[in-house]
Image (spheres, grey):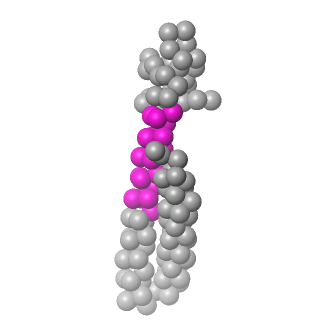
């Protein structure tokens, strides 16, 4: 199902325009593709910022846990840090790299 990049409602073909959503937005083929691409880029940017924030917070909490001698919590936070860093690297290398290759 196609969704509208502006309001997220379903997009269908229409007589007056190649694509129209339930919210009344109309798109030509290239316009819809461009809007979808822009939306994906913005959403991936938000994902990157959220992951960076989570990594920073986990790092701060891990430092506090180490200072306080809370080894169980420290191990947990270190695993969270590693997972967050792996996920961030994947998003940057695989997903953002692909978008850079596609965009003109």
Residue 96 picture location, percent across and down:
50, 56
Residue 6 picture location, percent across and down:
42, 30
Is 30 included in the stretch rendered in magenta? no
Q: Quadrant of the N terminus?
A: top right
Q: Residue at x 38, y 70 (%)?
A: 57
The secondary structure making up most of the magenta span is helix
The one of 39 and 54 positioned closer to us in this rendering:
39
Work out whether residue 95 can be spotted. Answer: yes
Looking at the image, how many numbered discs can be counted on the residues? 0
Residue 13 picture location, percent across and down:
58, 17
Q: Residue furthest front?
A: 104
Work out whether residue 8 can be spotted. Answer: no
Q: As drawn, is 20 to the left or to the right of 50?
A: right
Q: Residue at x 42, y 53 (%)?
A: 45
Is 36 included in the stretch rendered in magenta? yes
The one of 95 and 80 positioned closer to us in this rendering:
95
Q: Residue furthest top?
A: 15
Q: Residue at x 53, y 75 (%)?
A: 82
The one of 81 and 35 positioned closer to us in this rendering:
35
Q: Residue at x 41, y 52 (%)?
A: 46
**Span colored in magenta:** 33-51
Instruction: Relative to 49, say whether 6 is above or below.
Output: above
Res 58 → quadrant: bottom left
């Amino acid at each position: 199902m196609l969704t509208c990049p502006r309001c997220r409602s379903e997009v269908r073909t229409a007589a007056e325009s190649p694509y129209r959503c339930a919210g009344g937005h109309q798109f030509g083929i290239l316009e819809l593709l461009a809007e979808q691409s822009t939306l994906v880029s913005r959403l991936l940017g938000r994902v990157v910022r959220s992951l960076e924030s989570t990594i920073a917070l986990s790092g701060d909490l891990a430092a506090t846990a180490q200072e306080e001698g809370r080894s169980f919590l420290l191990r947990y936070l270190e695993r969270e840090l590693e997972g967050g860093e792996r996920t961030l690297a994947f998003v940057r290398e695989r997903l953002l790299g692909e978008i850079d290759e596609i965009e003109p």
